[in-house]
Amino acid sequence: MATAKVRVATVWLDGCSGCHMSFLDIDHRLLDIADRIELVYSPLVDLKVFPPEVDVTLVEGAISSEDDLEKIKHVRARTKILVALGDCSVTGNVPSMRNPFEVKDVLARAYLDPDLTNPGVPSLVVPTLLPYVRPIHTAVKVDVFIPGCPPHADTIFYVVAELLEGRLPDLSAKTRFGA
Amino acid sequence: MRRVFTLKIDDRDVSGNEEQSVLDVARENNIFVPTLCHVDGLTAIGACRLCLVEVQGVAKLLPACTTMVREGMVIHTTSPRLAEYRKMIVEMLFTEGNHICSVCVTNGHCELQSLAVKLGVDHIRLPYLNPIREVDASHERYAFDFNRCILCTRCVRVCEEYEGAQTWGVMGRGIESEIISDLDQPWGDSKTCTSCGKCVQVCPTGALFLKGKSVTEMVKHREFLPYLATMRKVGKNGHG
């Protein structure tokens, strides 16, 4: 008898995609779980809309812009178990290193100070930056935290495997900030 | 003759002498008590509060490193209350500075980072303060990244107690406190610093490091301290 597949999504906010790379580093073990999950949304697949009733969502990256904030609230509302994947999502990490400075100074440093052919701060299309980069748990409820930069593929696999078994993973001593 | 006391730690009968702290006796008996400002060989100051323990008959929690053992003491080193306080202390240390482990010279060798793991801190529940702090790279061989300083004052103590240079000190109060060299001048301009590097080695985080070290490369070596501590004791007792 076929059981319903677990609906899994991954989301990429302000991060370097290293956590997604580490997720792919699960390698052949992904094949072992492939017939038990359905990847319903991810930067790795070509779906544009985050679907309703997702069982597990892994979130890479911090909340840095108004768009990130809107997205994470939308994702949370449609997800049963929300997993903060990696240090950016859990602590703010490298993106948060701009926090001691004002946004206008940070933008000027990137877009005006260097000797550019066409200096100018982008203002159209790109989302507005928030005053502070924040971990995702400051905006929505998080069910599982996976520190690490990036978390090891074995750690991510352990979390996914445990969640597939219907258990909340115990990550104590398995990873750390900066791992 | 030092007096010997018998006491209970976590329901175990243990003994210690009058010169030993609760922490000393706990460690002798392989009972884990988390510490951060403490390092063997330096004067205990009870500043970080991670080693707080419950002592029967005493209403407040006491730091194990500065509480001397007494006859008949009944001590508990673990409880839900202590676990929660310890977690909160580590979380507050993370919020107070700018500790970005992934890009730290001491990533993987940091006492704050490993304590977070040991105490089950997998995220920080308090808001980050994002302070503006400087990096003093004026010294020829070493640098001080104040973003990663937790004010344990190990550097201050080792400089005073072993090197006798008294280069490091603490300026300001409360959240404004900071470590300064000499009269708050760049480290490189210090007239008292002997460049011995003891402060770098005892620093528990990536705040003090050797120039030229990149992410994860700064491994601290503290072997010299127990050796010096022993030699000092021998000298004091006149057996040297």
Image: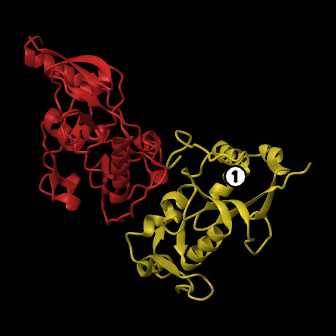
Chain colours: A yellow, B red
In the image, residue A98 above or below residue B76 = below
Identify residue for label 1. A23
Q: Residue at x 41, y 69 (%)?
A: A99
Q: Would you place residue B199 above or below residue A70 in this image?
A: above
Q: Quadrant of residue B10?
A: top left
Considering depth in this image, is B215 or B194 the residue closer to the camera?
Answer: B215
Considering every residue shown, the one lying at the far front of the view is B57
Amino acid under label 1?
A: Phe
Choose between B105 and A85: the one closer to the eye. Answer: A85
Using the rendered image of the protein, determine whether residue B202 is visible from the camera's viewpoint.
yes
Q: Is residue A114 visible?
A: no
Task: Give coordinates of residue A96: x percent, y percent.
Answer: 46, 65
Q: Is residue B22 left or right of residue B30?
A: left
| Quadrant in the picture for residue B28 | top left
Q: Residue at point 31% right, 46% down?
A: B141
Pinpoint residue B39: horizontal percent, then vertical percent: 27, 33
Percent coordinates x, y for residue B215 in the rendering: 47, 48
Tell me: B114 left or right of B59.
Answer: right
* Residue B168, position as x, y percentages in the image: 17, 47
Is B193 placed left or right of B115 in the picture?
left
